[in-house]
Structures are given as structure tokens and as C-alpha cells.
Image (cartoon, rainbow, N blue to C red):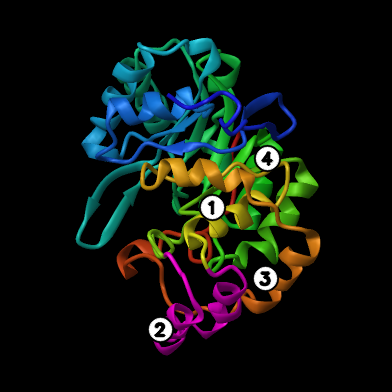
Amino acid sequence: MVDEQQRVQIPRVKLGTQGLEVSKLGFGCMDDVGIMIIKHAFEEGITFFDTTDLYGHKTNEILVEKTLKQLPQEKVQLATKFGVESIGPGGLVVSGTPEYVCASLESSLKRLDVDYIDLYYIIRVDTKTPIEETNCKKLVEEGKIKYIGISEASPETIRRAHAVHPITAVQMEWALWTHDIEEEVVPLCRGLGIGIVPYSPLGQGFSENSYLKSLSDAIVYLTRGFSAFGKFFYIYKGSYFSKLALAWVLHQGDDVAPIPDKENLDSNIESLKVELTEEDLKEISEIIPINEVAGATLPENLMQFTWKYTNTPPKNNAKV
């Protein structure tokens, strides 16, 4: 058991302006996550749990339900997502029709065995259905969800969705080498009062288990083409890079709550103890500029469904 004096106190932050308060560090419940590790995360102070009806062919929500039954529901903030009907060789089959959202929600409520969902995300944007027609506002009015979120959405889509009903959180990939959302998406969200939930804050696992003890370790990475990170590795030699990388994301603002998965859970929690000054953050950003790291973080058939490549279609006088 962890000594209470040594336990990291995970702060609380507010996402959006609608009243949702979550733990500063969330937990992404991926396919193979187990009940015990979710319980361990909760015991350490994480109360913000993120899943989707997509994981495990919809079985992940059932696993999360089994865990939640063992936790005080009033202390948990649960997020799930809808919008992908299936995954095939050509990529995702996405739907944002009002009929699909209602059916998806009812199924998720049943699998999770809850009366409402705290934060309900549109996981990907349907390029055939105007975002106004998806109409998650109706689900809020019915009391079936408390807050609305959207993932991998373009600035235009975010603006239009927010105009129908205030969006509480936007979920995007945000890590040391994928911070292109800082140019337009982050300022937009802050201007509208929308919280930001970074997924893959450790860069699709790149920074996990990278323990750098000396400059020679950094040189190994330099020769592999990661020259932008060399100085960062050197400055913080002797530290787990994953811890430092997550700390960088955590320091991006009080409206940011990343959701790493189960890998290195205790190290992720320890990242909250890492102190980075404004000067540190500025220097790191200069070392790793937005366009320094090139290449896709997902397979091509999935990248086409991310925010740079999709947009909600014209309203066509859609009623909202």
C-alpha cells in the first residue's frame, strides 16, 4: 500500500464551461484493460475514465461496467463515444445520423448499466450528415447524457457543433511530436470555453520505456533520426522520457486532461510531480517545433478520418 504522505495528489480540473469536473489525469480504457488496473487507477485518484463502443467489438463497455459496479459511481466521470459502425479494409464506416446516435446511446447505456453518461463523444465526423442533424442536444435535454464531446473534428465542425449546444470537451491527439492542433484547434477551444482531452499523450507509445541514463543514450536516438529530441533527452538524462513527455502535456493548461492508457500507470501518475517552468515549456517547444516531426501516427486508411481530412457537410437548411 502506498504511504499517504508519498501518494501523488491528482488535482481536479474543469472541462468546458458546463460544469464537468474531472481528475487532471484520466485513464483510457483500451481493449485489453483489466478490472484490477482500473480499480488501481481509481485508488490512486484517477476518476475520469474513457471508453468507446468501438473497443473490443463493444465488449469494452461491459468490462468497464463490471468495474464501475465496484466503485462509487458518484465519484466517477465516465466518457464513452459513438460514431463508427464498423472498420473495414477501406477504413471506418462512420455515421452521425440522429437515428444512429440514439440507437448507439441506448446500447451503451445498457452495456454500461447506467442511467446517463457523463461525457458522450462523437468519435469521428460523418462527412455525409451535417453535424447539426446529429443533434446530441436532444440527448442532454432527455437527461441521458450530461455533456457533449467531439473527437478529431475540424475547427469548422467544432464551431458548428458548439453553436447547436455548448461542447464540453474536444478529444484530439496531442503529444510532444503531434502538437499541430496548437495552431488553430487549441486557440479555438479556449475561445469557446471547451476543454481539451489529449489521447495518445505519449505519442502512440513511442515514449514508453525510454529510459535515458547518459548522453550516449541520446546519441542512439539522434542516429535514428530524432534529432529534435536530442537536447531534451540530454537535459533530462536519467529520467523516464515517458514521464517527462506526459508532464509536458499536463502543463499545457488547466483545461487539459490527458487520457493515457494502462501502460506505465504508476509512472504516468508520477508525471504529475514533474515541475516544468514556463521557460522549460518554451524551450521544449522550440526544440520540438510543430512541423519538426513528419509522418503519420495512424495507418493511412485511418488517418483519412482525422480532423485535417474530414469536415461536416453544409447544413442544407437542416433543422436543429
Q: Quadrant of the N terminus?
A: top left
Residues shaded magenta: 211-237
Looking at the image, tell me whether mark 3 or mark 2 is earlier in sequence order. 2
Looking at the image, tell me whether mark 2 or mark 1 is earlier in sequence order. 1
Disc on res. 162: 4
Looking at the image, tell me whether mark 3 or mark 4 is earlier in sequence order. 4
Residue 174 is at least partly visible in this image: no
Q: Residue at (65%, 26%) from the top-left corner?
A: 20
Disc on res. 172: 1
Disc on res. 284: 3
Q: Position of residue 190 (x, y in %)?
A: 76, 48
Closer to the camera, 52 or 125?
Answer: 52
Badge 3 local density, few (<14 within 10 Å), some, or many (20+)? some
Q: Which amino acid, by three-letter code, is at mark 1?
A: Met
Q: Which amino acid, by three-letter code, is at mark 4?
A: His
Q: Which residue is mark 2?
A: 220
- What whole-number distance in Å separates the C-alpha atoms at marks 4 and 2? 46 Å
Q: Is residue 182 left or right of residue 139?
A: right
- What whole-number distance in Å separates the C-alpha atoms at marks 3 and 4? 32 Å
Q: Which amino acid, by three-letter code, is at mark 2?
A: Val
Q: Position of residue 113 (x, y in %)?
A: 35, 12
Looking at the image, tell me whether mark 4 or mark 2 is earlier in sequence order. 4
- What whole-number distance in Å separates the C-alpha atoms at marks 2 and 1? 30 Å
Q: Nearer the viewer, mark 3 or mark 4?
A: 3
Q: Residue at (58%, 34%) from the top-left corner?
A: 8
